[in-house]
């Protein structure tokens, strides 16, 4: 094998007491095999992206197995223990010289090396056994390898625990939404409506009615027709131009925004959103919602978004955001899409959607409860991002030997 593939992963400088080894000399990799995935299986089937299902049988039963994405998500690295079935789009460790390399250290080392560089440049990038076996890795003594792996595992454990807290918080929010947006707070009398059972005191009204009563003062989408910007009209700075993919966790992620000039923004007759507007993705991607928070006097929304502007004395925008996220509302969106061949809920159809509306004080109380769960989830996600940055920094210095660990 030529050095063409091997050299895609450059060798790094190593401490004098670390050794350089060819991966294929200490580890034997094999291609996985196509599995039969069953609903009653008990052995995980691993693909390039991780567990993809369960199998009634297993192909590998090792104390520890490292898997590398071979095709598809090529270069992704996983480590697992016990009985598994590696699918045909992964390579897996058949054997390993554990007198030279600790497998957990190897897992982190392969992750750090970014094996995507080994993939052949085809329609479906592929990593071969020979390409993987030809890379060179540097490794310290086993005792130092294990110490490094232990440090990184501790961070991984913290990330996993944070993920569990995030999942539990999201499950709590889901339960609270179901309770609060159908039963409300401190109600004892209920009634059947077009959208199911709700408290007796609540109103059920169509969007048209909310607009007529001035609960909602602005309801327009970003269908700009011939005025829609051409790709070359977007600029580096200016007035943000928003699309559905920017709605993340009930907010707007401006990192994904495009921009148009002030002069170009002045040409749009509609689809102008302001701070506090509730944005709904209604075209192609349907259902995500977020509240726009901006100090700018305006932003422009694209074809995939509709803006709802609330009269805050009558309708809380936070309550509206959570109601739009709820099953009550999302089921209505799905019902409309099933009636057409297009994955969209046009603005005319939105006008006939039903909304359950308590009085403003209860709206604010419900929104406050749900926002606290959102804040908890957001805090945990920020913790996870900090841990991920810590792990990345530790891998850079520990796996290169730039920072040495003490081995007792």
Image: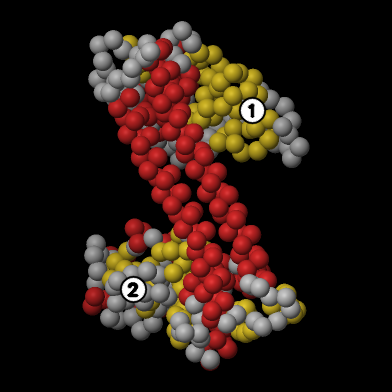
- Camera-side residue: 177 or 145? 177
Residue on which the image places disc 1: 85
Q: Position of residue 229 (x, y in %)?
A: 33, 71
Tell me what residue is drawn at x 52 percent, y 70 percent: 367
| Quadrant placement of the N terminus | top left
Instruction: Give the answer, above or below, for where 196 lies relative to 76.
Output: below
- Camera-side residue: 197 or 8? 197
Residue on which the image places disc 2: 299
Q: Position of residue 101 (x, y in %)?
A: 44, 14
Instruction: Give the answer, above or below, for where 205 lies relative to 121.
Output: below
Quarter of the image holding residue 255? bottom left
Q: CA distance from mark 2 to mark 1?
A: 50 Å
Q: Residues within 10 Å of mark 1 (few under 14, many from 20)?
A: many
Instruction: Give the answer, above or below, for where 42 lies relative to 401.
Output: below
Res 344 visible = no
Which structural element holds mark 1? strand
> Which residue is situated farthest in the bottom direction here?
212
Q: Position of residue 286 (x, y in %)?
A: 54, 66
Res 322 visible = yes
Labelled disc at residue 120: none
Number of numbered tags placed on the structure image:
2
Mark before the other along the chain sequence, 2 or 1: 1
């Amino acid at each position: 094998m030529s050095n063409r593939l091997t050299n895609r992963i450059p060798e790094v400088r190593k401490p004098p007491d670390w050794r350089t080894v060819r991966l294929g000399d200490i580890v034997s990799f094999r291609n996985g095999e196509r599995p039969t995935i069953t609903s009653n299986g008990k052995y995980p089937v691993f693909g390039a992206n991780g567990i993809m299902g369960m199998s009634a049988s297993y192909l590998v039963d090792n104390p520890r197995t490292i898997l590398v994405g071979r095709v598809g998500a090529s270069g992704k690295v996983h480590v697992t223990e016990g009985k598994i079935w590696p699918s045909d789009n992964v390579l897996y460790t058949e054997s390993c010289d554990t007198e030279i390399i600790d497998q957990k250290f190897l897992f982190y080392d392969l992750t750090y090396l970014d094996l995507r560089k080994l993939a052949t440049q085809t329609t479906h990038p592929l990593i071969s056994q020979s390409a993987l076996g030809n890379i060179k890795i540097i490794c310290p003594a086993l005792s130092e390898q294990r110490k490094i792996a232990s440090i990184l595992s501790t961070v991984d454990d913290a990330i996993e625990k944070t993920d569990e807290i995030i999942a539990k918080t999201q499950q709590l929010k889901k339960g609270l939404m179901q309770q609060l947006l159908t039963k409300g707070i401190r109600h004892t009398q209920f009634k059947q409506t077009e959208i199911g059972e709700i408290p007796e005191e609540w109103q059920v009204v169509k969007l048209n009615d909310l607009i007529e009563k001035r609960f909602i003062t602005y309801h327009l989408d970003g269908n700009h027709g011939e005025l829609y910007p051409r790709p070359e009209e977007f600029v580096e700075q200016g007035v943000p131009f928003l699309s559905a993919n920017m709605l993340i966790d009930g907010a707007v992620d401006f990192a994904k925004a495009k921009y148009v000039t002030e002069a170009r923004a002045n040409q749009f007759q509609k689809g102008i959103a302001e701070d506090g507007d509730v944005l709904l993705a209604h075209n192609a991607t349907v259902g995500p919602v977020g509240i726009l928070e901006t100090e700018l006097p305006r932003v422009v929304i694209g074809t995939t978004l509709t803006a709802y502007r609330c009269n805050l004395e009558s309708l809380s925008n936070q309550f509206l955001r959570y109601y739009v996220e709820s099953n009550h509302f999302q089921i209505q969106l799905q019902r409309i899409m099933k009636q057409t061949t297009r994955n969209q809920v046009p603005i005319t159809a939105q006008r006939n959607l039903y909304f359950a509306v308590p009085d403003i004080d209860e709206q604010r109380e419900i929104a406050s409860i749900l926002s606290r769960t959102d804040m908890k989830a957001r805090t945990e996600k920020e913790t996870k991002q900090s841990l991920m940055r810590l792990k990345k920094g530790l891998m850079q210095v520990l796996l290169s030997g730039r920072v040495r660990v003490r081995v007792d």
